[in-house]
Image: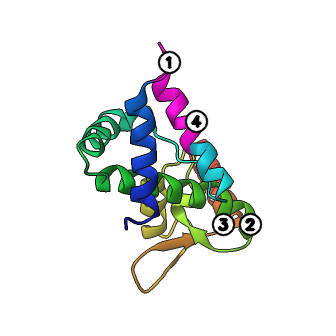
Amino acid sequence: MPGFPERLAEVHCRFEQTHPFLDGNGRAGRLLLNLILVRFGYPPAIIYKRERSRYLDALRKADRGEPGLLGEMLARAILDNLYRFVILAVAGPARLVPLSALATSELKASALRAAAGRARLRAVRNASGRWRSSRVWLEEYKASRYSRDRD
């Protein structure tokens, strides 16, 4: 019996195979996928445009009966949104969260890791080497960054 991500990939793939509409099957399929996720209490899985070719390759493999890659991609998308939106909202401003949860379009997680490594962003590294910081510390970093840029 496959795990939840693989089963989700199979259901998504099956809908895409059905191809019920003249246009918009992919969008409708991803909306249906996210409806299922939300109904089960998970955050939606967002497949970004930059991931399109990987997504289509994974969907083709699932179409051939190999849902693992698509399941992994969906699981990662769910986790990314969990970190980005849910954990950050629940944590509060002073709680330490992974840097990926604090990343924005202006400040990518890689830039935050670099700032933490250079001790410009207050952050704590856990035993596995992952950086954690807080919204309060991030705002302090952004303010100091702005003042450095003006000097």
Q: CA distance from mark 1 to mark 3?
A: 48 Å
Magenta-highlighted residues: 20-33
- Tag 1–tag 3 contact (CB < 8 Å): no
Provide the secondary structure element on which disc 4 rests.
Answer: helix
Q: Residue 137 shows which numbered tag?
A: 3
First reached walking from the N terminus: tag 2 or tag 1: 1
Residue 41 in the image: state x and y as whole percent: 67, 59
Badge 1 amino acid: Phe
Q: Nearer the viewer, residue 83 or 94?
A: 83
First reached walking from the N terminus: tag 3 or tag 4: 4
Write the residue at 47% across / 24% down.
Answer: 25
In this figure, which colouring scheme has been used for the structure? rainbow
Camera sees residue 113: yes
First reached walking from the N terminus: tag 1 or tag 3: 1
Callout 4: few (<14), some (14-19), or many (20+) C-alpha neighbours within 10 Å?
A: some
In the image, residue 87 above or below residue 22: below
Write the residue at 43% across / 59% down.
Answer: 5
Residue 93 in the image: state x and y as whole percent: 75, 66
Q: Residue 21 shows which numbered tag?
A: 1
Badge 3 amino acid: Trp
Q: Residue 19 is drawn in which quadrant?
A: top left
Q: Nearer the viewer, residue 37 or 145?
A: 37
117 left or right, relative to 96: left
Label 4 sits on residue: 31
In the image, residue 144 above or below residue 62: below
Residue 57 in the image: state x and y as whole percent: 26, 38
The N terminus is located in which quarter?
A: bottom left
> Within the magenta stretch, is there residue 115?
no
